[in-house]
Image: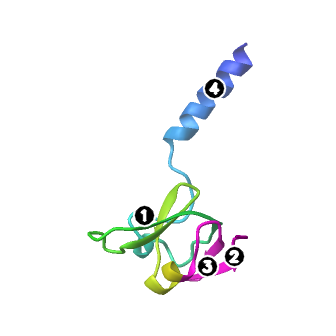
Amino acid sequence: MIKVMAIVALMAVAQILPSCGGQSSPAGGSGVSSQAEIIGWVDEKRSRIWEQTPYMVVINAQEYGVPYEFWMAVGVGDLVKFQGGKWTIVRKART
């Protein structure tokens, strides 16, 4: 019983502490460090008029600003990668 409570307490503390990932901001690609690497499936495509980077993709529930050309080429379900300051499509979704 004590072990279970300790695990639950540690999980709660882990949710509070910030992660050690790349310095990405939800608002856009300008906040993503060029040294950060992001790999994941596109869950959604969004655009917002009032944002500094208006074209966004959602990967693992995190918004990332992307260039317009990439935003037009990528689709929901595509596997994408951000590495060295450049977004690429690794694999297109099966339609």
Q: Distance between the Cα atoms at labels 2 and 1?
A: 25 Å
Select label 2 or label 1 by which is in front.
2
- SS at mark 2 in the image: loop
Q: Distance between the Cα atoms at labels 1 and 3?
A: 16 Å
Residue 92's label in the rendered image is: 2
Looking at marks 4 and 2 on the same chain, the residue that comes earlier in the sequence is marked by: 4
Residue projecting furthest to the front: 95
- Residue 6 x/y as whole percent: 66, 23
The amino acid sitting under disc 4 is Val
- Magenta span: 73-95
Looking at marks 2 and 1 on the same chain, the residue that comes earlier in the sequence is marked by: 1
Residue 43 lies within the magenta run? no
Q: Distance between the Cα atoms at labels 3 and 4?
A: 35 Å
Task: Pick the residue in front: 93 or 36.
Answer: 93
The amino acid sitting under disc 1 is Ser
| Residue placed under numbered mark 1 in the picture | 25
Q: Residues within 10 Å of mark 4 (few under 14, many from 20)?
A: few
| Residue placed under numbered mark 3 in the picture | 83
Looking at marks 1 and 4 on the same chain, the residue that comes earlier in the sequence is marked by: 4
Q: Are marks 1 and 3 in contact (CB under 8 Å)?
A: no
| Residue placed under numbered mark 4 in the picture | 8
- SS at mark 4 in the image: helix
Looking at marks 3 and 2 on the same chain, the residue that comes earlier in the sequence is marked by: 3
Q: Is residue 51 left or right of residue 1?
A: left
Q: Residues within 10 Å of mark 2 (few under 14, many from 20)?
A: some
Select label 3 or label 2 by which is in front.
2
- Residue 81 x/y as whole percent: 63, 75
Instruction: Locate residue 94: give its quadrant.
Output: bottom right
Looking at marks 1 and 3 on the same chain, the residue that comes earlier in the sequence is marked by: 1
- Residue 38 x/y as whole percent: 61, 69
Q: Quadrant for the C terminus, please.
A: bottom right
Q: Residue at left 49%, top 78%?
A: 71
